[in-house]
Image (cartoon, rainbow, N blue to C red):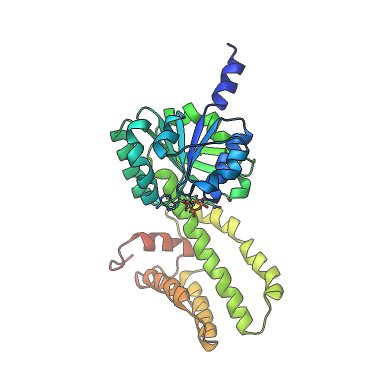
Amino acid sequence: MSHETLTQDHQRQPVTILGLGPMGQALAGALLQAGHSTTVWNRTPEKAEALVARGARRAQTPAEAVTASPLTIACVIDYDAVHTIVRPAAEELRGHTLVNLTADTPARARDTAAWAIGHGIDYLDGAIMTPTTTIGTDDALVLYSGPEAVFERHRSTLQNLGGRARFLGADPGRAAAHDVALLDLFWTSMSGLVHAFALARSEGIAAAELRPYVQGVVGLLPDIATEFADRIDKSRHVGDQSTILSAVAGIEHIIHAAEQRGLDTGVLYSARAIAQRAIDARHGEDGFSRLTETLSAPATAAS
Ligand SMILES: NC(=O)c1ccc[n+]([C@@H]2O[C@H](COP(=O)([O-])OP(=O)(O)OC[C@H]3O[C@@H](n4cnc5c(N)ncnc54)[C@H](OP(=O)(O)O)[C@@H]3O)[C@@H](O)[C@H]2O)c1
């Protein structure tokens, strides 16, 4: 058998998908599109119908589903659901690979990896960083961590879920750690975005009027992220362009303006409190990147 034929066969290894929410359906659809024999199972079986019409095989139980393929991908709402589904199928999973693309905390990823190892199951934990519409396209980004040999064994199949399958290392919590850090950025930014629009609206400014300037501010972030990453890794937080003292003065203006319009200021108070901790620890003349270290220190200690 030629190398090419071997590769093609491997790319088309049977795969099982547990969980058919929007993301599970997208994953199963991409595998079908790529020519994999795909077995699916979902708590609510009706959600499999469109996939069955496209050639997927519907299993009656998780145990039947995982028996059908050397590789099973779980993608459900949280790890409690994952455990509810896979624990009764542990014996059938023994000697197979379980890739868990459900989002949760790094600690839960590590615990699930330990459970899997204890049952003779090869386990990779993963995090999907892009929306359902990207799955199966070059725009998808899925992060993986766990045993590298397991990732390499299934790399070509996993690549069919989307253009960018990134392996991050042996610690099974590493993909989830990237996920929560990036979602931290996303949701605090989203919170700032809606607050900015609400503050503008309270001053009679339509969202469409503010939008171009919002995009200007958002456009500053890539360069700031690059600069901060360098400063944080070197622990060099020079306040050459702007200081924490100056930032706090700016945050206070926003708090006053928001309070005058009766808007919630909880997030702004939290932002100011963290900066104040750095000022109290005599870092007021440093740059804002210093707050990474302030946040990492216990709240009661001078940081
Ligand atoms: N949607 C996205 O764009 C996106 C992007 C990146 C990452 N993700 C991640 O992908 C994962 C799945 O997301 P999703 O969008 O497909 O929808 P979801 O609402 O997070 O999950 C729905 C799935 O979970 C199952 N489920 C919920 N509770 C269960 C339980 N107690 N026992 C068994 N199954 C249970 C549902 O089954 P039923 O159908 O029976 O209710 C369904 O299969 C999540 O971790 C999410 O964070 C999603």
Judge from the rendering whether residue 254 lies leftward or rightward of residue 170; answer left or right: right
Residue at x 51%, y 56% (from the top left corner) = 228
Asked if one can make out residue 89 in the rendered structure from this viewpoint, the answer is yes
Q: Position of residue 158 (x, y in %)?
A: 53, 34
Looking at the image, is 63 positioned above or below residue 224?
above
Residue with the most extreme bottom position: 260
Residue at x 61%, y 30% (from the top left corner) = 35
Front residue (pair 127, 45): 45
Judge from the rendering whether residue 239 lies leftward or rightward of residue 200; answer left or right: left
Residue 161 is drawn in which quadrant?
Answer: top right
Q: Position of residue 113 (x, y in %)?
A: 34, 39
Quadrant location of the N terminus in the rendered image: top right
Q: Position of residue 286 (x, y in %)?
A: 45, 65
Quadrant location of the C terminus in the rendered image: bottom left
Looking at the image, is 126 positioned above or below residue 267?
above
Q: Position of residue 271 (x, y in %)?
A: 45, 71
Asked if one can make out residue 146 in the rendered structure from this viewpoint, the answer is no
Looking at the image, is 262 positioned above or below residue 171?
below
Judge from the rendering whether residue 165 lies leftward or rightward of residue 65; answer left or right: right
Residue at x 37%, y 27% (from the top left corner) = 95
Front residue (pair 51, 73): 51
